[in-house]
Image (cartoon, rainbow, N blue to C red):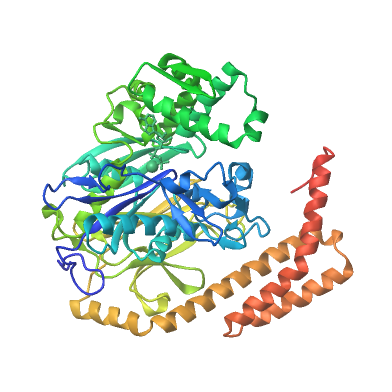
Amino acid sequence: MAKIGINIATGSLQQEEMIVGIDLGTTNSLVAIIHPESKLPTALKEHNTSSLVPSVVHFDAFGNPTVGEEAKNFLITEPQNTIFSAKRLMGKSYNDIKDNADFFTFKVIDDNTESLVKVQVGDKFYSPIDLSSFILKELKQRAEHILKTPVTKAVITVPAYFNDAQRQATRDAGKLAGLDVLRIINEPTAASLAYGLGLRKDEIATIAVYDLGGGTFDISILQITNGIFEVLSTNGDTYLGGDDFDRSIMQYWMQEVGISNEDLKANKELSQTLRLKAEEAKKHLSNNETFETEVNGDKLSITRADFETLIDPLISKTLASCRHAVKDASIHVSDIDTVVMVGGSTRVPAVKKAVSGFFEKPVNDSVNPDEVVALGAAVQADILAGNNKDFLLLDITPLSLGIETMGGLMDVLIPRNSKIPTKVGRQYTTQKDGQGGMRISVYQGERDLVQDNRKLAEFNLTGIPGMPAGLPKIEVTFLINADGILVVKAKELRSGVEQTIEVKPQYGISDKDVELMLLDSITHAKDDIAKRALVEARTEGEQLLATTERFIAKNANLLTQDELVATAEAMQALQLALTMEDKDLIHKKQEELNDISRPYAERVMDMAVSAAMKGRKIEE
Ligand code: ADP
Ligand code: MG
């Protein structure tokens, strides 16, 4: 294994270069660094202000964005121009969020339910990536202002349950904001790092990270083995957090002084005031027994005991999630070595007490819970910068490692320059109904098509029980141990069938070869992009043909003769386009087929819906 310092494109990073850690939160975001003198993780803030930047973007009449505290002031007065919780929309389609559409007080575009969501403000449209990039840009600017130096490299955290699309979206937002995102790391991993967990080479530990933020709750169970963090399970509630605590106080007061929900709707100012007062009360009660205030001549008060009664059901809900997570991790509460508290809402004493009771041990809460994730990201950033001695010279993978997916594409699981040891898993599924096996071909290299890379190994996962296409969950795991041996495992999660193989990834590759392969990937980059686009278009086209065929087979009796003929023709045209080297033509034919099938697909759907409404059972 080549011993080289972390090397991104041109060679090792300069020592003095500051890589920042960023917690891009649903409610609040912030930046942290390892302080150059104290060497301690430190959250960045201007003198006399908070390190937290509310993750809120307000657009003025000209579409100019403002981010943070200032934007937050518009939440109630200009809800349609003020975007909060953009993180919830990352990598999502309208279909994914429609059940919670009421939550958003701004316009989420709902006309194309399949494609990624956009938000409309005035006559402009913004993707969640755009919105997150505004927040990141603000953070970058603040950091530059405080550090008095350009900030271009960052580690950004995401929830452990974020899928590839959501992680990629976060990366893209960073890029848009002018940041080179060196690594995306899991929030619970970052929180653990901030407590110094996982930094010792021989450490083996099981950690529970309890993260209660403004609007979301996450519990993650992590296993640390020799510096590798593995997520054993995650659970939580994407609509439960400190905001609900505020709301419960608001309701309590409204009942007390006789304000109805209608009154609130009619009086935005009152609503805003009450909400802010409720949050103030909640925070106050974290350190005091009672809170008193006055709103419009009405005396409002609440005791800590009252507050605890109000939120008890909410806390119980989080503990139920914890129970699930422990069960899914196949461990017992007593196996957990350390409990880490994350998120501003864990400042509530009743929360701490309940969590400590559940896990039967004191919790770790010495690090500021709303900064801990960013602080951990800074620790990771420092390791990447090569400033952390123990990690100064890391074994890294010289070339990317991945498997072949549909159409001969290279799907990278471990990108080149990844630290070793490392472990990465990704889920795949079958393409055909009843498919009993799956070939796993392992490749090494930087090119987009596997045929241009080096094949390292191949094996078959067999014995997958018969299921409809798309249902099996095949998890492929790449593990490179400290000796540079790659172990590839494929496991069908529903049935438990699995297969493992060992490969020496660097076998037979000299530094010269590595150099050549890298050069090759650069020379062919443009070419590769075009080829990948074509392969992807073909795969998409084939999938569309297959779904259309299935739909017709099931619903032919509900379509007119004309529709059947038009569909058959469009399918034929698409089939033909698939044999040609022209991705645009494929897209065009795909659209034409879609245009023909959309009206009757909707009609059939409507019929199914109204049949269901009549209480009749219908076959799916
Ligand atoms: P997120 O991870 O969702 O971005 P944070 O971790 O910043 O959110 O948590 C924000 C929540 O923490 C808000 O609901 C805020 O009111 C709450 N919070 C902050 N400080 C306190 C406190 N002292 N007591 C209780 N809740 C607090
Ligand atoms: Mg958070």
- Residue drawn at 48 percent across, 76 percent down: 532
Residue 53 or residue 165, whichever sits in front? 53
Residue 502 or residue 540, whichever sits in front? 540
x and y percent of residue 555 in the render? 80, 58
On-image quarter of the N terminus = bottom left
- Residue drawn at 60 percent across, 81 percent down: 584
- Residue drawn at 35 percent across, 24 percent down: 286
x and y percent of residue 238 in the render? 50, 40
Instruction: Relative to 210, say whether 445 is above or below.
Output: below
Name the outermost residue toward the right. Answer: 561
Residue 286 visible in the shown view: yes
Name the outermost residue toward the front. Answer: 297
x and y percent of residue 111 in the render? 68, 58
Instruction: Relative to 565, say whether 286 is above or below.
Output: above
Ligand 1 shown in quarter: top left
- Name the image quarter holding residue 52: top left
Residue 427 visible in the shown view: no
Left or right of residue 61: residue 230: left
Mark count: 0
Instruction: Relative to 468, say whether 292 is above or below.
Output: above
Residue 175 or residue 135, whichever sits in front? 135
- Name the image quarter holding residue 259: top right
x and y percent of residue 300 in the render? 50, 19
